[in-house]
Amino acid sequence: MSAASPSIPAVKAGPKPAARMNPKTKRYLLSALTLVGFFLLWEVICLASGVSDLVLPRPSQIAVVLWQKFPLLWPHTVQTLYTTVVGFALGVLVGVVIGVIIGSSRLAYDVAYPLLVGFSSIPKVAVVPIFVVWFGSGTVPAILTSLVISIFPVVVNVATGLATTEPELEDVLKVLGASKRDILWNVGLPRALPYLFASLKIAITLSFVGTVLSETVAANKGIGNVMMIASGNFDVPLVFAGLFILAVLGVLLYAISAYIEGRLTGWTQRKTDMAMA
């Protein structure tokens, strides 16, 4: 007769571990809370200090102006966005071409780079009247101002990305029979992509500066023109509403650039989710 097997006591299940929040969701949530906290602090400081609306309007007043005057502001917003995007796109195109030429040739670098630096050092507010004389007031001077102000960071970063390609890698490819064009297309340009997208994030903000600058000087349409008229009428909440619109447009285009960067150059980015967990 076999001995009875000892009974095994049941193990009481402990509480399930709490689900951890996705690191990306956590970052987005913290960013949103920081933004809300900033506007709440702004509102409280204005109310507590009794500062005049002519000096610093409250966020709630700016929101009311945006709501009430949205039909008026919308065409100007579209105009500013269109001008900025066109000028930015043309500036990136010209900047990439110049950057490739300068980054691929030491002779072109020595000859053209000082001229480019000198042209970039000219205050763009001094260039706007020249564009007005050449093309008249309106959209064209704003596009050109946005274009010229966004070229320099693109040229510098693209040229740097191409110039930092390892000579040993180029020598190996040449031994394997690759031409200079093959090396540029298959190695140089892909390696310069992170530099290019870094410059795009700078150039997009500069493009808005160029557009608004031209709109305040030589345009009858656009957020810059609205802000200039509002400041002349001491309508400070409307001026801040224009600034808010420009900030939202800038963040939107920056986010688009960052998304495209992640899709095309994700292989160059370090994984930081573990550190953020």
Image: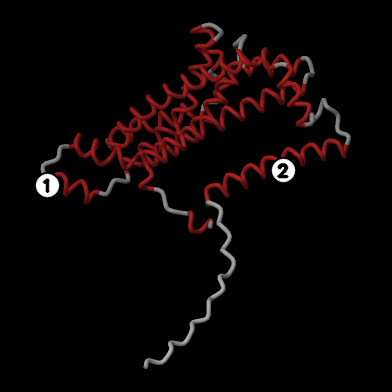
The percent coordinates of residue 218 (x first, y second) are 60, 11
Instruction: Give the residue type that dot 1 points to.
Output: Val
Mark 2 closeness class: few <14, some 14–19, many ≥20 residues within 10 Å: few
Residue named by callout 1: 175
Q: What colouring method underlies this structural image?
A: secondary structure
Q: Quadrant of residue 205?
A: top right
Q: Is 159 in front, or is 42?
A: 42
Above or below, comparing residue 164 to residue 53 in the picture = below
Q: Residue at x 56, y 30 (%)?
A: 250
Badge nearest the viewer, 2 or 1: 2
Instruction: Give the residue type that dot 2 points to.
Output: Gly
Q: Quick one: SS at disc 1? A: helix
Residue named by callout 2: 37
Q: Is 214 in front, or is 59?
A: 59
The percent coordinates of residue 83 (x first, y second) are 51, 17
Q: Residue at x 28, y 40 (%)?
A: 188
Query: Which residue is outermost to the front?
Result: 1
Does residue 172 appear to the left or right of 79 in the view shown? left
Does residue 137 appear to the left or right of 166 in the view shown? right
Report the number of numbered marks: 2
Above or below, comparing residue 238 to residue 4 in the picture = above
Q: Using the numbered discs, state the Cα–Cα distance from disc 2 to disc 1 in whole angstroms.
A: 60 Å
The percent coordinates of residue 210 (x first, y second) are 55, 23
Q: Residue at x 48, y 54 (%)?
A: 273
Above or below, comparing residue 7 to residue 213 in the picture = below
Q: Is 231 in front, or is 148?
A: 231
Q: Earlier in the sequence, mark 2 or mark 1?
A: 2
